[in-house]
Image (cartoon, rainbow, N blue to C red):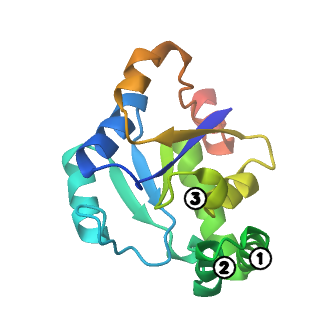
Amino acid sequence: MSVVYTIGYEGTDIDRFVSTLKAVGVKCVADVRAVALSRKKGFSKKALSSRLEEAGIEYMHFIDLGDPKPGRDAARAGLFNKFRAIYSAHLDTDDAQSSLKELVDVAGEKPTCLLCFERDPVTCHRSIVVEAMTVSDDFKVMNLYGDDPERYVRNASSVPRHNPRKGAAAAQQTLR
C-alpha cells in the first residue's frame, strides 16, 4: 500500500512548507488548484515549481482536478454540503477522471503530496480527491500541516512512508 500525502499552505511560508515535504520524503507535489496563483509569496505556479525543483521535488499541476469557481464560492460562503456536491459532480467529468487516473499512477510510483490552499483538509476539495484515490485501498492518506515541519522529524518513526505499487510492468521486470 502506498501513502498519498496532502497539504495546504494556509498559515505557513514557503521555507517551512518545503521543509515539511522534505521531512516526510515527498518527491512530487501534485497541485490540484484550478488557478495556480497566490497572493502568498512563493506559492504561485512558477515560483513554487522553481523552489520545489531546487529542493529536488517535482511539481505537477493537475488543473482538471481544481475546484470550479461555483465550488470555491460555496466553500468561501461556508456552504460545505453545496461545495462537496459541486466538486463531486465536477470530479465525475471525463477530464477530471482522466486527470485523476494520471494522479493515481504518479502517486503509485513516487511519494506524492496533493497541494491546495486550505490548511484544514476537511474544508478543501483535496479531501474529495483522496477519497476517490483511496476507493481501491491502494493508498492510505496522511494529511500534513506545513506550520511545524519539525513535528515530522520528531515523530519520524510514526510517519508512514511510501511503498511503490508493483504493477504488471514491474512484475515483468522482476521475472526477467
Residue drawn at 53 percent across, 52 percent down: 106
| Picture coordinates of residue 12, whole percent (x, y) | 34, 49
Q: Earlier in the sequence, mark 3 or mark 1?
A: 1
Q: Secondary structure at mark 3?
A: helix
Instruction: Determine which residue is flagged by label 3.
Output: 103
| Picture coordinates of residue 128, whole percent (x, y) | 70, 60
Q: Is residue 111 visible?
A: no
Q: Amino acid at mark 2?
A: Ala
Q: Amino acid at mark 3?
A: Leu
Could you say which quadrant of the image residue 60 lies in? bottom left
Q: Which mark is residue 74?
A: 2
Quarter of the figure that contains the N terminus: top right
Marks 3 and 1: which is nearer the front?
1
Q: Is residue 101 left or right of residue 116?
A: right
Residue reaching furthest to the top: 157
Count of numbered badges drawn on the protein:
3
Instruction: Determine which residue is flagged by label 1.
Output: 82
